[in-house]
Image (tube, rainbow, N blue to C red):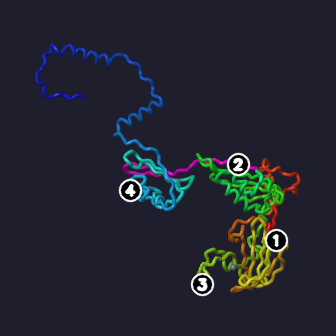
Amino acid sequence: MPEISAKAPKRPPLGILLPPLLIALSVAFWWRYHPRPEPPPMTGQALLRLASDTDFHNLEPAPSPLPWEHYTIAPGDYLTHLWQEQWQLPAATLYRLIKTADHGELLNRLRPGQHLEWRADSDGKLLALRLWENEAKGYQWNLDQDSITARPLEKARSSQRVRITGVVKTSLGAALSVQPALAGAAGSVSAQLAELLPVGRQARHGDRFSVLVDVENLEGSERAYSAKLMGFEYQGARLRASAARFDDDRFYKPDGTSLLPSFWRHPFPDKLRYRISSPFNLHRHHPVTGRISPHYGTDFAMPVGTAVEAPADGVVRRVTRGLLAGNYVVLDHGNGYQTRYMHLSKVRVHTGDTVQQGQVIALSGNTGRSTGPHLHYELRMNGRPVNAMKVPLPTKGQLAKDELMRFRNQYAAYFDFPANPNDGTEVAHRDPEQ
Ligand SMILES: [Zn+2]
């Protein structure tokens, strides 16, 4: 607005001022009273535009935000250093985030591979920071003058069931690794399959396979985020097998028999319980030396001569006598499951024998290095000792009639179920070494 001057040096005569004054008055009168159409009602978009225009014009012009920057934490990275030296962000903001923001302490424990994204304004002031703790989840902090708000981030996931068929050239793992649908998850599928179907050296060039996998993808990513094996079929020169995952998360053959042999929790009838004198413990301290000396089995205190029974069908792999283990039996139950029994007084089986669940294989004792009559019982899965009292075991040998119906309906499109359930293919239960 023009400033009004306080001191006008000379008053001009009224005759000169009157005509322009009259013109101005009549224009003002016309402007105020002439008929004008109602303005059209505002559309939502117009309102939005108005709102943003208003913000833009009424506020102090804010420095415009810069595009999102991003960085993946590498081993040996030091956030304070990156923050100040490389990203040119104010150190005080980092301390404020760590000390005051919800979940801000996560910035103190960054791990290699975690991803950070941030956005600053042209003055170098941080506006927002995102930390992706893993591929799928993280937090975003929005900063303004006096507050920091945190909100969780989660990428949308989509899942699809894919069926992949192929021919083995060198190994099953190699054949899976070239499947585009499994990109990023072929190793996981291979490992899941290996636990159920130890193809190993039985694979032959030209063997055919098909796997059914639930693949999960994260929004914006082509690579599989997770993969869950749902079924497999292997038609090889030396091995034929097929099975699928049921509601209980266990695998069953098309005829409804459990892929893994049914397992008892204890190597004796369940009603006869013996006290555990020493549990499975990978970090046990040796009672004498004090050093870490893992206990790979479960010890049951039981009188010498107690019957020890095979907890599952299998084959006797080894019968031996050792200085520490005393009389010692190893059973192989197929599919990577092995059980071991130590300190026995008498062994009732021979290497190579086939044993059935519940068959007496030995009598417990106190042989070898043992501080009292007890049975040392060990379960190994794919060579790795596991806690036989805790690990999930296939306790069910066969699906019940209604379960089998459900199972068949679920996988009807995958397995071409044979009319006669006895035609179902078999998993070889013997290790190739045998
Ligand atoms: Zn023991």
Tell me the residue at 42%/54% (across/down): 86
Percent across and percent down for residue 365 are 76, 84
Q: Does residue 195 sit above or below 25 in this rendering?
A: below
Mark 2 vs mark 1: which is more N-terminal?
A: 2
Q: Does residue 342 sit above or below 64 in this rendering?
A: below
Tell me the residue at 79%/49% (across/down): 412
Marks 3,4: beta carbons within 8 A = no
Percent across and percent down for residue 414 are 78, 49
Residue 289, numbered circle: 3
Comparing labels 4 and 2, the label whose residue is closer to the camera:
4
Marks 3,1: beta carbons within 8 A = no
The answer to whether the beta carbon of the residue marked 4 is less than 8 Å from any atom of ligand 1 is no
Residue 242: image quadrant is: bottom right
Alpha carbon separation for disc pair 1 and 4: 66 Å
Marks 4,2: beta carbons within 8 A = no
Question: Which stretch is magenta?
Answer: 138-165
- Amino acid type at mark 3: Thr
Comparing labels 2 and 3, the label whose residue is closer to the camera:
3
Question: Can you say which quadrant of the picture contains the C terminus?
Answer: bottom right
| Residue pointed to by mark 2 | 161
Alpha carbon separation for disc pair 3 and 4: 50 Å
The answer to whether the beta carbon of the residue marked 2 is less than 8 Å from any atom of ligand 1 is no
Mark 3 vs mark 4: which is more N-terminal?
A: 4
- Amino acid type at mark 1: Val
Mark 2 vs mark 3: which is more N-terminal?
A: 2
